[in-house]
Image (cartoon, rainbow, N blue to C red):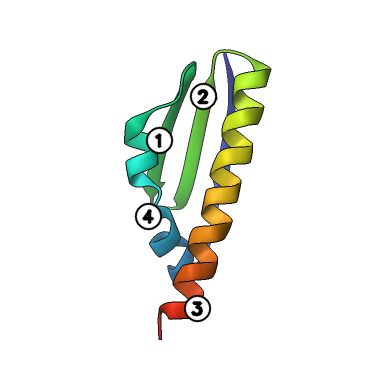
Amino acid sequence: MKSADLVFSGLQSEKALEALIPESEEGMRRVEVDISFDPPRIRIVAEDTRALRAALNSYLRWFKISDEVTTKYDH
């Protein structure tokens, strides 16, 4: 098994992570994802390197989009 932890900081990060919870519950083949908030973190555990890389790319892209939207519209 391969794993990665993505740790974030700040209130905006928590809000962006909240938007990713449905994706983590939906699941991906060969991947388990856990989102926690103390500290704000995404933990990805995958069966192999390819699955880990794909999940990392997806979650980082989704986080970036969520963070941009949250930052732009949260005033």
Residue hosting label 1: 34
Q: Position of residue 58 (x, y in %)?
A: 57, 40
Residue hosting label 3: 72
Disc 4 to disc 3, C-alpha distance: 15 Å
Residue hosting label 2: 45
Q: Amino acid at mark 4?
A: Ala
Of circles 3 and 1, which is in front? 3
Disc 2 to disc 3, C-alpha distance: 31 Å
Local secondary structure at mark 4? loop
Residue ID at (38%, 37%): 24
Residue ID at (45%, 25%): 28
- Are there few (<14), some (14-19), or many (20+) residues within 10 Å of tag 2? many
Q: Tag on residue 19?
A: 4
Q: Amino acid at mark 3?
A: Lys
Local secondary structure at mark 1? strand
Disc 2 to disc 4, C-alpha distance: 20 Å
Asked whether, in this view, residue 69 is left or right of residue 52, the answer is: left
Looking at the picture, tell me which residue is in the foreground, 71 or 34.
71
Q: Earlier in the sequence, mark 1 or mark 2?
A: 1
Look at the image and tell me whether residue 74 can be seen.
yes
Of circles 1 and 4, which is in front? 4
